[in-house]
Amino acid sequence: MNVLNNLKIGTRLTLVLSCVLLALLAVAASGLWGLSSISGTTQRALSQDVKLAEHAAEIQTLILLARRFEKDTFINIADATRRDDYVKRWQANRAKMSSALADVSKLDLPREDAEAVVGMGQHFAGYVNGFEAVVEAIKRGDISTTQAANTEIGKSKGAVQGMESTSEKINERAMLRAHGVSAIVAGMQTRATTLQLVFAGLAVALAVGLCWAVTRSITVPLDQAVKVAETVAKGDLSSRIGTTSKDEIGQLLAALGRMNDSLVGIVGQVRNASDSIATGSAEIATGNADLSQRTEEQASNLQQTAASMEQLTVTVKNNADTARQATQLASSAASVAAQGGEVVGQVVSTMQDISHSSKKIADIIGVIDGIAFQTNILALNAAVEAARAGEQGRGFAVVAAEVRSLAQRSAQAAKEIKNLIGESVGKVEAGTRLVDDAGRTMGDIVAQVQKVSDLIGEISSASGEQTMGIGQISDAVTQLDQVTQQNAALVEESAAAAESLKHQAASLAQTVSVFKL
């Protein structure tokens, strides 16, 4: 930015335009480079792969024509004239085939395609030898039927199929490479487009950055000059104008700075004289104004105090009435809380009885469980004795087994009942503890409500005494308000005289107060 400030404005604008033109040239050059690369790749593809595909398609067509002329020759085997005509057509087609193979061999082919072309030439030579041998045999009379000719040429079927498959593969590979070239061209086009966009973005960024820098280098000093002129127009001479640029705007700011310094000296001398005159008269006017203001504020405060005392009297009376009502409500609440405490005590007693009964039931279940256990042991002993008695004790063993089963079911049922009773006892104990807590809480509530009732009674008594005291204070404040208003009237008359002197002294100071040094 400092470098730009030292240049003339015309030079800055020329610099920006030159940089933008260079950026546009870079964008155009990148576009031409991309088009050149795409054109070269496309031409290489057209000169090799497309020509190879065309020759492969031509060879396939010539193979089909050769097979057609072959079939026509064998069909007309008995008609020598027509047969010789088709043989001549076949020979003309063979010449075209040889020329096409020679053209393909001249191309700059990949190794795989070059080997395939050589192999196709070998297959073609084998097919030619086979067909010519059949034609010679027909002319000699060794072969006289179409079927025999087809059978003989079938020996060269492998060569024909080799030519067809090889030409198809060459054509497929050429087309694949052509499609690959299309993909490469598309990629190159994408890269060229991206490169152009990058250069265009850089060009735009460069242009925007330079425009912003040059604009700032021009507008910022101009804004500073405008602000200085506006400040001086408003009478503010306190600003200091500094510049480091050497262009036209820097020269303008330097001239404004010299003008501002001259005005500061002139206005400073005038202000010092007017301030000395205004100081004495302002002190007198200020003292009277402060006294008048304080007197008025005191009178206003006394009026507000009197009004507040009246409101306070009404509020205290209302508080006394409310306190009496609260005392009655607190007494009622204490009575209700006491009744609630008695009810909770009864609930506690009932829960304790339930707990004792549950424990007794648990003990009884324990006895039943013990009886079932002993019965089970006796039944087990009886079963042992019955087993010893053999056949005579079989019936007794059955009875002992049933008794043992019954004892086990009784023990199981007693255990389940015991578990249920245990859970019930636990819940009853928990409920008893909660009810005990509730009883203690109700007792605390009764005590607190009684304390609140006593405090409200004391508040009611104190509110009555406050009402009497506030009435006496209100009368005293009213008398003080009347005296203060009389004093305020006298102070206002004195302040008016001092204010007149102040305005006359301030008129001179106001003339030069517009300027700020």
Image: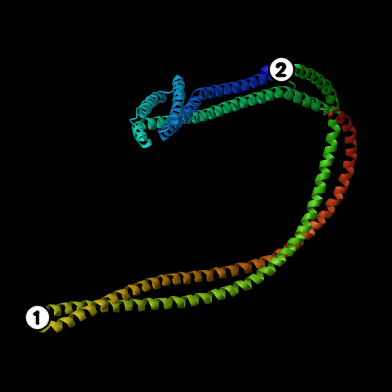
Q: In this view, does 410 lie to the left or right of 97?
A: left
Q: Which of marks 2 and 1 is in front?
A: 2
Residue under circle 1?
A: 390
The disc, 2 or 1, on the residue closer to the chain's N-terminal end is: 2
In this orientation, which residue lies closer to the viewer: 21 or 401? Answer: 21
Residue 224, position as x, y percentages in the image: 75, 25
Residue under circle 2?
A: 14
Q: Can residue 160 be seen in this view?
A: yes
Residue at (49, 23) in percent of width and height: 48
Residue at (38, 32) in percent of width and height: 161
Residue 201, position as x, y percentages in the image: 62, 27
Q: What residue type is labelled 2?
A: Thr
Q: Residues within 10 Å of mark 2 (few under 14, many from 20)?
A: few
Q: How many marks?
A: 2
In this orientation, which residue lies closer to the viewer: 20 or 124? Answer: 124
Residue 329, position as x, y percentages in the image: 62, 72
In the picture, which quadrant includes the N terminus? top right
Q: Which amino acid does label 1 sit on?
A: Gly
Element at badge 1?
Answer: helix
Q: Can residue 468 be seen in this view?
A: no
Instruction: Say which mark, if any, is on residue 466.
Output: none
In the picture, which quadrant includes the C terminus? top right
Element at badge 2?
Answer: helix
Q: How far apart are marks 2 and 1 (CA)?
A: 133 Å
Vertical relation: 497 (above or below) 45: below
Residue 496, position as x, y percentages in the image: 89, 41
Vertical relation: 383 (above or below) 154: below
Q: Residues within 10 Å of mark 1 (few under 14, many from 20)?
A: few
In this orientation, which residue lies closer to the viewer: 38 or 139? Answer: 139
Q: Is residue 151 left or right of residue 497?
A: left
Indicate the colouring scheme. rainbow
